[in-house]
Image (cartoon, rainbow, N blue to C red):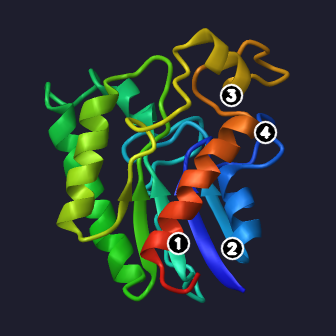
């Protein structure tokens, strides 16, 4: 069974917010084994409560997985005014560049792909983040899936927030973490993206 390394934050991490994540749905349909590297609160730059950022935890896994996807995180945007001398976007792009350079060196024959964060209710300057991720992906010639600006989730709409983001801990939704229905919507787009870019399905 082909292994799929899923790198990300709390939306990739298996936790109490949903019974199944996007990668669980996709893996069951495509016959993949998920290697879960999702850690809550993290991003390309951000550490959180003992969970370190993507670059700090980057390591080579053997045997090499056939597919590696990296989902970005608006957690990074919480650092917008912290220690970057007014140039957060430059720091973010440099970190992404460094990260993907190392990752591609680890997995030169795997399908390595980038996925934008899904939309957050609070936005956090989402458009610049997505565009930086798109630019870095193009620079490294890796496929990029925009889950944010072309998403039906739209958590800033109250009905969508309740439908796609509610859980026992947040009955009205938290505007960030999709529930089972939300993950199903993400899964449909991720599956189509993998089928388009990986000839083995």
Mark 2–mark 4 distance (CA, rounded to whole Å): 21 Å
Going from the N terminus, do you reach mark 3 or mark 1 first?
A: 3
Going from the N terminus, do you reach mark 2 or mark 4 first?
A: 4
Mark sitting on residue 111? none
Mark 4 or 3: in front is: 3
| Quadrant into which the N terminus falls | bottom right
Residue 160 in percent (x, y) is at 63, 20
- Callout 1 touching callout 2 (CB < 8 Å): yes
- Callout 3 touching callout 1 (CB < 8 Å): no
> SS at mark 4?
loop
> SS at mark 3?
helix
> SS at mark 2?
helix
Mark 4–mark 3 distance (CA, rounded to whole Å): 10 Å
Count all numbered tags in the image, as a single digit. Answer: 4
Quadrant of the rendered image containing residue 79: top left
- Callout 1 touching callout 4 (CB < 8 Å): no
Mark 3–mark 1 distance (CA, rounded to whole Å): 25 Å
Q: In this view, does 179 lie above or below 95?
A: above
- Callout 4 touching callout 3 (CB < 8 Å): no
Q: Please name the residue that numbered disc 4 is placed on.
A: 18
Q: Who is closer to the viewer here, 5 or 55?
A: 5
Look at the image and tell me whether residue 97 can be seen: no
Label 3 crowd bin: few (<14), some (14–19), many (20+), radius 10 Å: many
Q: Who is closer to the viewer here, 93 or 129?
A: 129
Q: Who is closer to the viewer here, 95 or 70?
A: 70
Mark 1 or 4: in front is: 1
Q: Residue at x 79, y 15 (%)?
A: 171
Residue 199 in percent (x, y) is at 48, 84
Q: Please name the residue that numbered disc 2 is placed on.
A: 30
Look at the image and tell me whether residue 136 can be seen: yes
């Amino acid at each position: 069974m082909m292994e799929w390394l899923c790198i990300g934050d709390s939306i990739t991490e298996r936790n109490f917010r949903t019974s199944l994540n996007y990668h669980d749905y996709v893996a069951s349909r495509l016959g993949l084994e998920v290697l879960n590297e999702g850690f809550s609160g993290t991003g390309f730059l951000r550490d959180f409560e003992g969970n370190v950022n993507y670059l700090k935890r980057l390591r080579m896994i053997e045997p090499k997985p056939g597919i590696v996807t990296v989902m970005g995180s608006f957690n990074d945007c919480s650092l917008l005014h912290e220690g970057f001398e007014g140039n957060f976007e430059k720091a973010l792009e440099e970190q992404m560049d460094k990260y993907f350079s190392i990752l591609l060196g680890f997995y030169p024959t795997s399908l390595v792909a980038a996925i934008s964060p899904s939309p957050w209710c609070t936005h956090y300057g989402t458009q610049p983040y997505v565009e930086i991720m798109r630019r870095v992906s193009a620079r490294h010639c890796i496929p990029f899936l925009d889950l944010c600006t072309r998403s039906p989730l739209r958590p800033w709409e109250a009905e969508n927030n309740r439908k796609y983001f509610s859980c026992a801990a947040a009955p009205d939704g938290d505007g960030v973490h999709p529930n089972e229905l939300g993950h199903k919507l993400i899964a449909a787009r991720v599956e189509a993206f993998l089928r388009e870019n990986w000839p083995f399905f």
